[in-house]
C-alpha cells in the first residue's frame, strides 16, 4: 500500500500522524504483553540495572509495559520483561535461607 503524502492536507497529515503513533504504541504494548507471558507472578527473576550489579527478586505484578519485582533487599522495581531472566532453582529440596515452609502430608 502506497500513500502519497504530498496530496494530503495539513489536517489529514496530523490525523495520519496520530494514527501512526497510536498504532506504534499498540504494537509496543502487544510486544511487552507477549514477553510478560514468559513469566508468572511469584517467579524468581534476576535483572541488572545500569551501573549496578545483578539484582534478584520475586515478580509480584504485571503492569502495562513492565512487571513489578520486589528484590531480596525489599526494593521495588518496575522492569521491562525484556531485561528479566528466570532464576534457576537450586538442585534438591534444600529450602534453607528461604521463606518456604514445607508442609508434611498426612
Image (spheres, rainbow, N blue to C red):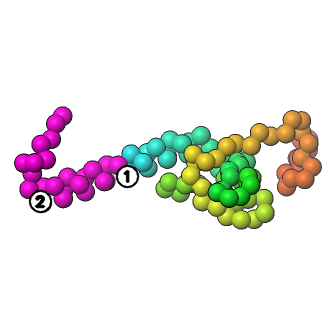
First to last magenta residue range: 1-24
In this rendering, does residue 28 appear at all? yes
Is residue 6 inside the magenta stretch?
yes
In the image, 55 versus 69, the foreground residue is 55
Contact between marks 2 and 1 (CB within 8 A): the answer is no
Which tag is nearer the camera, tag 2 or tag 1?
Answer: 2
Residue density around tag 1, few if under 14, some if 14–19, many if 20 or more, within 10 Å: few
Residue 72 location in percent, x, y?
78, 59
**Residue 41 x, y percent position in the rendering:** 65, 50
Which residue is found at the position 68% from the left and 58% from the top? 51
Task: Report the residue marked by disc 2.
Answer: 10
User: In this rendering, would 17 be left or right of 77?
Assistant: left
Mark 1 lies on a secondary structure that is helix
Q: Residue at x 13, y 47 (%)?
A: 5
Pointer 2 or 1: first along the chain: 2
Left-right relation of 89 to 22: right
Left/right of residue 93 with respect to residue 80 in the rendered view: right
Amino acid at each position: 500500500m502506497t500513500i502519497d503524502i504530498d496530496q494530503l492536507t495539513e489536517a489529514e497529515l496530523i490525523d495520519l500522524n496520530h494514527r501512526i503513533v497510536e498504532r506504534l504504541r499498540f504494537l509496543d504494548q502487544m510486544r511487552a504483553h507477549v514477553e510478560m507471558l514468559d513469566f508468572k507472578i511469584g517467579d524468581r527473576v534476576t535483572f541488572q540495572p545500569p551501573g549496578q550489579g545483578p539484582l534478584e527478586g520475586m515478580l509480584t505484578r504485571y503492569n502495562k509495559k513492565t512487571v513489578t519485582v520486589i528484590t531480596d533487599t525489599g526494593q521495588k522495581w518496575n522492569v521491562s520483561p525484556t531485561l528479566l531472566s528466570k532464576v534457576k532453582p537450586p538442585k534438591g529440596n534444600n529450602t534453607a535461607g528461604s521463606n518456604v515452609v514445607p508442609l508434611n502430608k498426612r
